């Protein structure tokens, strides 16, 4: 039965690529600079911060909830205690000097606490809107200009009349706008992946391989994998470098609904269905309600059904989405340079 499933789903996927059943674009534009009212993907923002991000992400027309979420995730991974080597602090990673000038009392309790997300998230949105106002006369996309001002300063954006020709700044703008797609609730069908067939091909060749916690498939590990190690290796064969950890892989692209899944999508399972940071398992969808996955110690890489009480959602991997995921310090959770 397993062999039949494997052959059948691969043939189905090839047919989808040829016929182009889902060739429509996702329709995810407008996440900043006119993206007011854009919804958040289910569970992408931890539930305890979702209302704050939705509210303050609509503070001005140059930001949106998904864009604000992308900044916060990029900076701290939703860790309110994160501290960077440069002493940037909290969920929004404010430098103390910047906080003194731009921190706001978001919850109205009489203080401005850099460590309190109820102040830090509103402060991040307020600071974005201040920057957007500073560069409001610059032509081009308002959100991109705001992000460029955040990274390089408003003067540079005004001087170059748009995103300045700095590699770091251009990379930052691309990273945040790409990550925003993974926090936005899709408003149409998500475009199919062009690399998924190759990833499935690799994963199928690993069927029957024993699971290894922390396994990356290296020779010294006898070619064994854990769940996220398998998905990393599968997509690496098609030129896409996924983050190593499953909950960061969730942000490697937009999120198709259960009834829109295509072979090659990553499917995720979480202990908390309202929080992507609690994801504990990932597999590679192959069609027909099945995935290839490395389940747990004592098992082998195999086909399993995806429908279970802890099914969280899916991601359609894109190269830009995978590249946008930040690298974090294992001890502090803060983004590393």
Image (spheres, rainbow, N blue to C red):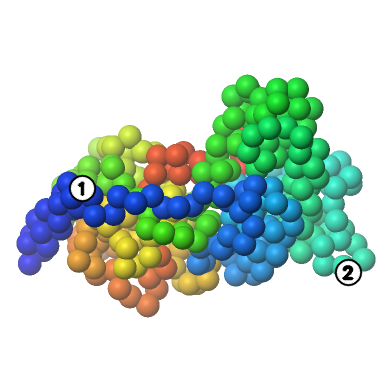
Count residues near mark 1 (Cα–Cα under 10 Å), then give few for <14, some for 14-19, many for 20+: some
Q: Nearer the viewer, mark 1 or mark 2?
A: 1
Q: Relative to the observer, which residue lies in front, 5 or 334?
A: 5
Q: Earlier in the sequence, mark 1 or mark 2?
A: 1
Residue for point 38% across, 50% down: 25
Residue for point 74% across, 57% down: 59
In this image, 293 relative to 110: left or right? Answer: left
Residue for point 28% across, 37% down: 238
Q: Give the Cα separation between the discs numbered 1 and 2.
A: 55 Å
In this image, 74 relative to 98: left or right? Answer: left
Q: Which mark is residue 17?
A: 1
x, y (%) of residue 228? 36, 52
Q: Residue furthest right?
A: 110
x, y (%) of residue 34? 63, 51
Residue 161 lies, with reference to residue 307, above or below; the image says above
- Marks 1 and 2 close (CB-CB < 8 Å): no
- Secondary structure under tag 1 reads helix
In this image, 244 relative to 261: left or right? Answer: right
- Image quarter hosting the N terminus: bottom left
x, y (%) of residue 72? 65, 51
Q: Which residue is mark 2?
A: 109
Residue 235 lies, with reference to residue 254, above or below; the image says above
- Secondary structure under tag 2 reads loop
x, y (%) of residue 234? 28, 44
In this image, 46 relative to 95: left or right? Answer: left
Looking at the rendered structure, the number of numbered marks drawn on it comes to: 2
Residue for point 70% across, 64% down: 55
């Amino acid at each position: 039965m397993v062999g039949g499933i494997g052959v059948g789903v691969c043939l189905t996927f090839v047919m989808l690529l040829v016929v182009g059943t889902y060739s429509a674009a996702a329709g995810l534009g407008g996440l900043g600079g006119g993206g007011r009212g854009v919804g958040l993907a289910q569970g992408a923002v931890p539930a305890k911060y979702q209302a704050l991000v939705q509210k303050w992400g609509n503070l001005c027309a140059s930001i949106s909830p998904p864009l604000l979420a992308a900044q916060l995730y990029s900076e701290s991974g939703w860790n309110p205690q994160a501290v960077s080597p440069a002493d940037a602090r909290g969920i929004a990673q404010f430098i103390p000097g910047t906080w003194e000038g731009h921190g706001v009392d978001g919850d109205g309790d009489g203080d401005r606490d850099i460590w309190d997300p109820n102040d830090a998230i509103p402060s991040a949105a307020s600071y974005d809107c201040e920057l957007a106002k500073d560069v409001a006369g610059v032509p081009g996309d308002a959100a991109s200009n705001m992000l460029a001002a955040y990274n390089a300063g408003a003067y540079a954006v005004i001087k170059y009349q748009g995103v300045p020709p700095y590699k770091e700044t251009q990379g930052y703008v691309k990273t945040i706008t790409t990550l925003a797609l993974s926090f936005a609730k899709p408003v149409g069908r998500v475009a199919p992946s062009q690399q998924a067939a190759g990833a499935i091909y690799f994963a199928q060749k690993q069927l029957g391989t024993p699971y290894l916690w922390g396994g990356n498939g290296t020779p010294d590990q006898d070619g064994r994998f854990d769940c996220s190690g398998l998905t990393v290796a599968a997509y690496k064969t098609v030129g896409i470098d996924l983050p190593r950890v499953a909950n960061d892989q969730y942000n490697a692209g937009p999120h198709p609904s259960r009834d829109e899944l295509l072979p090659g999508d990553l499917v995720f399972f979480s202990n908390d269905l309202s929080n992507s940071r609690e994801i504990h398992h990932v597999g590679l969808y192959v069609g027909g309600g099945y995935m290839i996955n490395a389940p747990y110690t004592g098992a082998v890489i195999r086909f399993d059904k995806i429908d279970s009480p802890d099914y969280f959602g899916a991601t359609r991997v894109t190269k830009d989405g995978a590249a946008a995921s930040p690298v974090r310090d294992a001890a502090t959770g803060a983004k590393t340079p």
